[in-house]
Amino acid sequence: MGGRDGIARILFFSASLLSASAGLAVLGFMVVLGLPVMESGMLWPILTDPWSPDHGQFGILAMVVGTIYIAGLSLMFSFPVSLGTALFIEVVRPDGPGKALKKLVRLMTAIPTVIYGFVGVFLLVPIVRNLGGSGMGILSTALMLAILVAPTMILFFLGSMARVPQAYLDAVDALGGTPYQKVVNVIFPHAWPGFLTGLILAFGRAMGDTLIALMLSGNAVTMPASVLDSARTLTAHIALIIAADFDSVEFKTIFICGITLYAMTSLGILLARHLGTR
């Protein structure tokens, strides 16, 4: 057993080292290819100016704001639904209905993102269009992203609740406690770090999605003023600009977009780990 444990530790350590190295290699790749832009003194204008290549402006501020706007709004829609679904599965009806719903949630994680995009274009956009605008905008994108990230959050929430000591839950039942008291006084105090981790990682996934944002957001490069306005995310911007001339400043700015997106996602993960540890 000692030899097997040693081999297992080496394999797990090697896998962790390989994963970390791959992540750092991706960051290094983007930094190296973005160095010409940084050395030219254009970094600050790229981060603050509007996007207007015809006028020599290649700013990504509107895309950064659009990314945060859409991802944040999607979590506002998805979090209460995901938390309620997880509580229904784990606490309210953990028997037949809960098991069936859990299988459905797992099935949703396997649906390709482009399918969500098609559903949004043909079903959601016409509904949102009745509220005003073209229907292709922040609200449509956020609603569809909320559906996309909900299974991730639900599974994280279920995993956190499953780690609550069973003896505590049995004690609440023995004392005649209600499901509400079990959730508020036992499950939430023990499982909240996992809830927070699932929330932040879902935010990272919402920021990193490309297809839904590309298909539903309208891809306007202006600063959004309302949820019905069109917007463009960093991922959609990279997908649209990548066909530009390799030597152009327009093309080189996508590496600044990648570094910015990488930094935003990394900060979210670090925050989740810090709060989860506390």
Image (tube, helix red, strand yellow):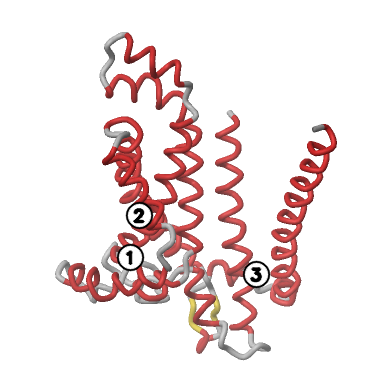
Q: Residue 80 at x, y = what percent?
A: 31, 42
Label placed on residue 73: 2
Q: Are marks 1 and 3 in contact (CB under 8 Å)?
A: no
Front-most of residues 64 and 59: 64
Residue 186: name its quadrant. top left
Q: Residue at x 65, y 74 (%)?
A: 42
Q: Amino acid at mark 2?
A: Leu
Q: Which residue does the image show at 30% across and 69% down from the upper left?
A: 229
Find residue 128 and report its horizontal and vertical position in percent: 20, 68
Marked residue nearer the N-terminal end (1 or 3): 3
Q: Residue at x 22, y 71 (%)?
A: 123
Tell me if residue 54 comes above or below residue 191 in the rendering.
below
Mark 1 — residue?
A: 138
Residue linked to disc 3? 43
Instruction: Determine the secondary structure under disc 2.
Output: helix
Left-right relation of 71 to 276? left
Secondary structure beneath disc 3? helix
* Secondary element type, mark 1: helix
Q: Quadrant of residue 180?
A: top left
